[in-house]
């Protein structure tokens, strides 16, 4: 009886260990996505604070801080959706299995 109880206990402990591993992976993925959202929001805020003339006029890409964690790129479409406006899409690609983060703004020349 004691042996059977130990086997059942061991199976339960293995189940808890598997749950912990899954939880750690989920937390890591959530951190990557949160970091990518923060990077994209920071870039959008920088673009918003610039004047229309100083806002990006061309597509670009960079590694946000040189450590290879996130790559950021942006595309600029002039006179879209109306004349004297720029549609700017910022895309952050986190390394790993996280999904890309995309944010789009429209900058208008007022």
Image (cartoon, grey):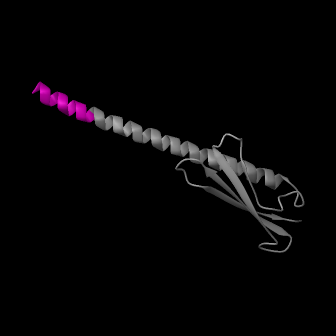
Asked whether 69 falls inside the magenta stretch, the response is: no
Measured as percent of width and height from the top left, residue 36 is found at 63, 48
Give the answer, above or below, for where 75 lies relative to 6: below
Side of 14 where 56 appears, left or right:
right
- From what the image shows, is residue 98 above or below residue 59? above
Q: Where is residue 88 in the image (x, y as percent from the top left)?
A: 75, 62
Decide whether the magenta segment is chiefly helix, strand or loop: helix
The residue sitting at 46% across, 38% down in the picture is 24
Residue 10 in the magenta stretch? The answer is yes
Tell which of 84 and 78 is nearer to you.
78
Q: Quadrant of the C terminus?
A: bottom right
Residue found 36% across the figure and 39% down from its top:
19
Q: What stretch is highlighted in magenta?
A: 1-12
Q: Quadrant of the N terminus?
A: top left
Relative to 28, 40 lies left or right:
right
Residue 106 at x, y percent in the picture: 77, 64
């Amino acid at each position: 009886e004691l042996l059977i109880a130990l086997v059942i206990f061991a199976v339960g402990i293995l189940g808890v260990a598997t749950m912990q591993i899954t939880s750690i992976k989920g937390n890591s993925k959530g951190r990557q996505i949160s970091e990518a959202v923060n990077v994209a929001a920071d870039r959008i805020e920088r673009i918003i604070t610039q004047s229309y003339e100083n806002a990006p006029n061309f597509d670009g890409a960079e590694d946000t801080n040189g450590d290879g964690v996130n790559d950021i790129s942006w595309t600029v479409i002039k006179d879209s959706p109306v004349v004297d406006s720029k549609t700017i899409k910022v895309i952050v690609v986190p390394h790993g299995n996280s999904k890309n983060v995309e944010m789009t703004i429209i900058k208008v020349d007022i």
